[in-house]
Image (cartoon, helix red, strand yellow):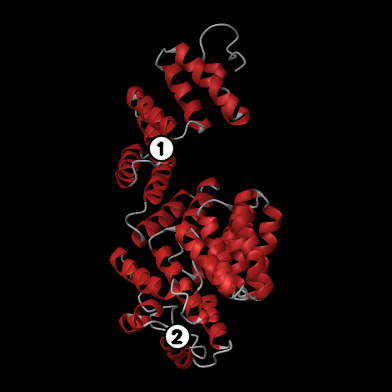
Amino acid sequence: MLRRTDALARAFVAGLLRGPLVVLAVVIMLGALTAPSSAVTRDYALCFGDEKGSDDDSGPIYGNEASVDDGAADRRIAACSVIAEDTTEALLLRAKAYFYRASARNDKEDWDGAIADYGEAIAIDPKQAAAYFNRGADWYNKGDDDRAIADFDVTISLEPSASEAYSSRGAAFLRKGNIDAAMVDYQQAIEADAQNSAAHTGLGQAWDRKGERDKASAEYDEAIRLDPTDMIALLNRALNRLNRGEFDQAMADYDAAIGIDPKSAEAYANRSAAWLSKDGWLRAIADASKAIQLDPAIVDGYYFRGLAWASNGNKDRAIADFGKAIELDANDARSWFVRSLTRALSGDATGAAADCRKAIALDPERAGTCGDQLAGGDGKPTSP
């Protein structure tokens, strides 16, 4: 999930203050004069929050952002709605109200509502980079990389030194599989702000995609040096270390990630894989089970627990877990593949053959030699 940027949000407010109504107090006074008498019940402070002003670049876009709960977000949305939807209100106040209502909707992960509100803010003032950036982040969170990239393009055209816009566009390019474009953006983000840990993390992921594990590891190291709580960097460095055979170091990264976020199902599932690499199948089962408890829809939890059960010789439980992984993601070739092998070892040649054909159809390279486990003939599966 992409984060909103406080710096660009403060720039949004500063941009409004540099508009036709130069002083915010004058804007509020003008809004009150043009609004109906019911305006006296409006809570401008609740909507706009603890703004520091254009000359103070140290605070968040509003004071409670880090700990807003649904109730607080709902109250902010209600307060902003009164201002945003009043056509007699000053335009710049309406733009601010739409912007802050969108921010509150982000807190509730209401991406559609936030996108609509940022669009309204942009319609009133199309030169505010923060609204484009935040809307791009929401498009990304919805999985629409093309629209995210389009909004980040505009953000960068308005704020060419916006490091977070480059790193966020890089994330969208990386998810689309355009690794080279992602790397250019991550490098540009680092050039704009060498302290941008997310850019180092993303560049590490891009190097990993290219098979450059040493370069990837160096970027993860820098990201974690800048932000020791960067979960993405920790989890990716741990996987990088697993692939390099550095099992104890990988385990240390997973331990650190779980210490930061004890409710991270992904961290427990991945640590389960690390335990498997160390032949610790009992601990692998415990970690995978914890991941499933935290997130019953986590495919990796069932997959790695299935591998652990198979390592213990418990084929029935392994097959059941692989089946659950397949139920959650029917396109997970690795689960079809290992269930094929496990069924073959259990004497279920028919089931093994069916699973093997499915694995090959999904990913011929990953399917590997599952046909060798099948009974009869030359050991090769029939064409899917």
Question: Visible in this render: residue 206?
Answer: no
Mark in the foreground, 2 or 1 = 2
Q: Residue at position x 58%, y 31% from top?
A: 366
User: 258 or 107, which lies in front?
Assistant: 107
Please, what is the three-letter code of the amino acid marked with disc 1? Phe
User: 252 or 90, which lies in front?
Assistant: 90
Q: Position of residue 261 (x, y in %)?
A: 35, 59
Q: Work out whether mark 2 precedes mark 1 in sequence or the reverse, and give the earlier one.
A: 2
Q: What residue did someone put label 1 on?
A: 304
Mark 2: which secondary structure? helix
Kindly indicate whether the residue at mark 1 contacts the one at mark 2 (C-beta within 8 angstroms): no
Rendered image: mark on residue 371: none
Q: What residue did someone put label 2 on?
A: 34
User: Residue 302 falls in which quadrant of the image?
Assistant: top left
Q: Spot the residue most to the top.
A: 377
User: Residue 19 falls in which quadrant of the image?
Assistant: bottom right
Q: Position of residue 74 (x, y in %)?
A: 32, 66
User: 31 or 343, which lies in front?
Assistant: 31
Mark 1: which secondary structure? helix
Q: Residue at position x 49%, y 21% from top?
A: 355
Q: Is residue 123 above or below residue 142?
A: below
